[in-house]
Image: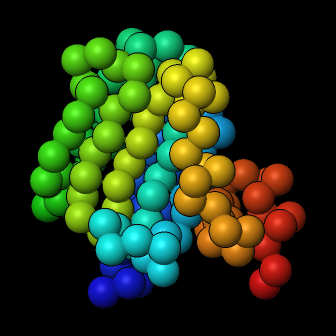
């Protein structure tokens, strides 16, 4: 099951990247919380782009048979949370992401998943 969730998180990250999401991170957090196995965190340039990113993820996930258990913040577009059970997606405006800094809460120094489209993260990959 863990591999399915990881694949889902990576697909979501790729969809965010394809639509120009910024500073995308995937964190493996199953050992830190019972809420989810992975978190995907991304930034949109403004509220309009945040909503567009979320709509794209929602549409693509639906095509694959994944429906969110809950979506919060879509109307405001400043911080949207999509709960896919094993993967929780957070899409922020830059201002809100900087304020809440979820990465600091959920990163333990070893749980950031390298992303193939991010050369900076690929360099950190110990494999």
Q: Work out whether 51 lies above or below 13.
A: above
Q: Is residue 4 visible?
A: yes
x%, y% of residue 99?
59, 27
Residue at 24% across / 58% down in the picture? 84
Q: Work out whether 90 lies above or below 55.
A: below
x%, y% of residue 28?
52, 70
Q: Is residue 20 visible?
A: no
Residue at 35% across / 19% down in the picture? 77
Marker count (numbered): 0
Q: Is residue 114 left or right of residue 16?
A: right
Residue at 70% across / 74% down in the picture? 110
x%, y% of residue 101?
60, 39
Residue at 25% across / 25% down in the picture? 74
Q: Is residue 99 left or right of residue 12?
A: right
The quadrant in which residue 7 appears is: bottom left
Assign the N terminus to one quadrant of the image.
bottom left
Q: Nearer the viewer, residue 46 or 79?
A: 79
The quadrant in which residue 23 appears is: top right
Most extreme residue toward the right is 123
Q: Nearer the viewer, residue 57 or 110?
A: 110
Q: Is residue 94 left or right of residue 91?
A: right
Q: Nearer the viewer, residue 61 or 2?
A: 2
Q: Work out whether 16 lies above or below 127.
A: above
x%, y% of residue 114?
67, 66
Q: Nearer the viewer, residue 50 or 20?
A: 50
Q: Work out whether 18 lies above or below 6.
A: above
Assign the C terminus to one quadrant of the image.
bottom right
């Amino acid at each position: 099951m863990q591999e399915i969730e990881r694949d889902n998180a990576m697909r979501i990250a790729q969809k965010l990247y394809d639509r120009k999401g910024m500073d995308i991170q995937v964190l493996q957090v199953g050992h830190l919380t019972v809420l989810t196995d992975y978190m995907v965190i991304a930034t949109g340039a403004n509220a309009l782009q945040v909503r567009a990113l979320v709509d794209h993820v929602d549409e693509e996930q639906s095509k694959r048979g994944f429906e969110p258990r809950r979506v919060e913040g879509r109307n405001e577009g400043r911080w949207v949370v999509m709960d896919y059970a094993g993967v929780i997606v957070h899409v922020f405006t830059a201002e809100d992401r900087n304020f809440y800094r979820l990465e600091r809460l959920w990163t333990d120094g070893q749980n950031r998943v390298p992303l193939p489209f991010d050369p900076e993260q690929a360099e950190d990959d110990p494999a």
